[in-house]
Image (tube, grey):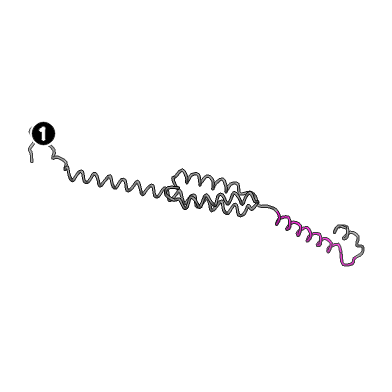
C-alpha cells in the first residue's frame, strides 16, 4: 500500500492530524527531491575538453615539444584522462582534469615562447658582437674633403 493510501485510510484525529499529514508529505517530498538531486549527473564538461584540446594543439604548434616537453606531455596525459573520465560518466573528475590539462598546455606554450624569445635575443647579441668586431678591424675611413675644403 502506498504512503498516501496509508495516510488517507486513517480516520479521526489520532496521531495524523491534517497538519501532521501535510508535514509528513512535505518531508517526504523533500527527501525525494534530495535523493533525485544527489543522483542527477553533472553536465558533461564539453567546453572544458574543447578548451584543453585547443590549448594542447596550440602548444604543439608553438613547438612546446622542443622547448617544454614535460609540460606538454603532462597536458596530453591529463587530457586523455579527462576524456576517459567523461566516457565513464565521471564528469566532475573529467572537468577537473580538463582544466589542469588546459593550464599545463598554456604553461608549455608560454615556456616555448619564452625560450624562442631568448634564442632570438642571443642571435641579436651575436650579430651585434660580429658587427663590433668588423668595425674594430676595419675602422671607417675619414671623410674625403671636397675641392676647396680644408683637410685636417
The 10 Å Cα crowd at callout 1, few under 14, some 14 to 19, many 20 or more, is few
Of all residues shown, which one is farthest toward the bottom? 15
Residue 27 covered by magenta stretch: yes
Report the magenta residues as a range: 13-39
Q: Position of residue 43 (x, y in %)?
A: 65, 50
Q: Position of residue 122 (x, y in %)?
A: 32, 48
Is residue 8 highlighted in magenta? Answer: no
Q: Nearer the viewer, residue 74 or 31?
A: 74
Q: Residue at x 54, y 48 (%)?
A: 52
Q: Say if 74 sits above or below 17 in the image.
A: above
Specify whether 97 is left or right of 150. Answer: right
x 89%, y 67%: residue: 14
- For the residue pair 152 and 92, the one nearer the viewer reads as 92
Left or right relative to 93: residue 74: left
The quadrant of the rendering that contains the C terminus is top left
- Mostly what secondary structure, the magenta segment? helix
Q: Residue furthest right?
A: 11
User: In the image, is residue 105 above or below residue 17?
Assistant: above
Q: Quadrant of the N terminus?
A: bottom right
- Give the labeled residue for mark 1: 146
Q: Looking at the image, how many numbered discs can be counted on the residues?
A: 1
**Is 31 placed left or right of 119 in the picture?**
right
Horizontal and vertical percent position of residue 19: 83, 63
At x 87% / y 64%, what residue is drawn? 17
SS category of the residue bearing label 1: loop
Where does residue 138 sit, x and y in percent of width and height? 17, 42
In this rendering, would 9 be left or right of 120? Answer: right
Amino acid at each position: 500500500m502506498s504512503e498516501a493510501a496509508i495516510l488517507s485510510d486513517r480516520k479521526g484525529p489520532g496521531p495524523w492530524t491534517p497538519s501532521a499529514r501535510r508535514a509528513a508529505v512535505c518531508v517526504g517530498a523533500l527527501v525525494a527531491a534530495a535523493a533525485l538531486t544527489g543522483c542527477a549527473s553533472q553536465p558533461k564538461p564539453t567546453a572544458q575538453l574543447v578548451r584543453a584540446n585547443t590549448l594542447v594543439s596550440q602548444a604543439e604548434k608553438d613547438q612546446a615539444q622542443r622547448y617544454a616537453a614535460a609540460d606538454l606531455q603532462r597536458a596530453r596525459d591529463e587530457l586523455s584522462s579527462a576524456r576517459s573520465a567523461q566516457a565513464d560518466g565521471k564528469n566532475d573528475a573529467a572537468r577537473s582534469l580538463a582544466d589542469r590539462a588546459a593550464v599545463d598546455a598554456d604553461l608549455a606554450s608560454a615556456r616555448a615562447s619564452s625560450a624562442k624569445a631568448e634564442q632570438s635575443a642571443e642571435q641579436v647579441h651575436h650579430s651585434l658582437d660580429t658587427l663590433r668586431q668588423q668595425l674594430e678591424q676595419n675602422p671607417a675611413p675619414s671623410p674625403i674633403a671636397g675641392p676647396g675644403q680644408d683637410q685636417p
